Image (spheres, rainbow, N blue to C red):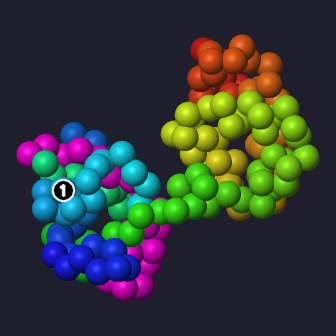
């Protein structure tokens, strides 16, 4: 492990978590977790100096943590289960800890009540909404999702918001 002004650099391997459908992850050693000081932070993870993505740490036990890494990212990196990777972690200083699509950002600028209600939500709930709004390729679908979620949010009682209700999913 090397600590620099840019972040913390270390080497680790690609593992699988069988209890979560063989999800692949980067193991974060105890020493790195201790250096970061907390599991409760958003990070920028750079793998092999070529791919950077926003993430959070999940507890793995014995002071260790993990960062999930999906199949598309592994393919981009040319990595697979068992391979070693160079990792650099930096604190994510962005407002939400995830990239906000322009359609959702614009709607927040235009809808004062939707903006107010959105900012009353927990950071995790905000990230869920932002990710859902931006997870489709079509700009029109991003607009439609953004409008639908903010309209649903405004109809819900404050403090009683659940992601399913914001999505408009029937229980």
Q: Residue at x 80, y 25 (%)?
A: 154
Residue 59 in the magenta stretch? The answer is: yes
Q: Is 149 on the left-hand or right-hand side of 48?
A: right
Residue farthest along the bottom direction in this orientation: 49
Judging from the image, what secondary structure is the residue with disc 1 in? Answer: helix
Please identify the dominant SS of the magenta region: strand
Return the x and y of residue 140 as percentages of the image width and height.
Answer: 85, 54
Q: Is residue 72 visible?
A: no
Residue farthest along the front direction in this orientation: 5
Looking at the rendered image, the quarter that the C terminus falls into is top right
Is 51 placed above or below 110 here? below
In the rendered image, which residue does mark 1 sit on? 34
Please state the extent of the stretch shown in magenta in the rendering. 44-62
Quadrant assignment, res 37: bottom left
Residue farthest along the left direction in this orientation: 62
Residue 93 in the magenta stretch? The answer is: no
Q: Residue at x 43, y 78 (%)?
A: 51
Return the x and y of residue 3 as percentages of the image width and height.
Answer: 24, 76
Looking at the rendered image, the quarter that the N terminus falls into is bottom left
Q: Is 138 on the left-hand or right-hand side of 74?
A: right
Q: Residue at x 76, y 43 (%)?
A: 145
């Amino acid at each position: 492990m090397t600590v620099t002004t840019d972040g913390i650099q270390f080497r680790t391997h690609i593992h699988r978590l069988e209890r979560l459908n063989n999800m692949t992850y980067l193991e974060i050693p105890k020493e790195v977790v201790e250096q970061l000081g907390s599991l409760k932070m958003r990070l920028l993870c750079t793998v092999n100096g070529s791919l950077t993505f926003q993430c959070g740490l999940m507890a793995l036990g014995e002071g260790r943590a993990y960062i999930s890494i999906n199949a598309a990212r592994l393919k981009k990196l040319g990595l697979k289960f068992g391979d070693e990777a160079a990792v650099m972690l930096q604190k994510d200083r962005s407002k939400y800890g995830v990239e906000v699509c322009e359609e959702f950002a614009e709607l927040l600028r235009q809808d004062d009540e939707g903006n107010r209600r959105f900012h009353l939500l927990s950071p995790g709930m905000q990230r869920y909404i932002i990710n859902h709004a931006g997870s489709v390729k079509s700009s029109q679908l991003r607009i439609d999702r953004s409008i639908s979620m903010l309209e649903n949010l405004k109809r819900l009682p404050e403090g009683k918001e659940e992601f399913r209700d914001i999505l408009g999913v029937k229980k």
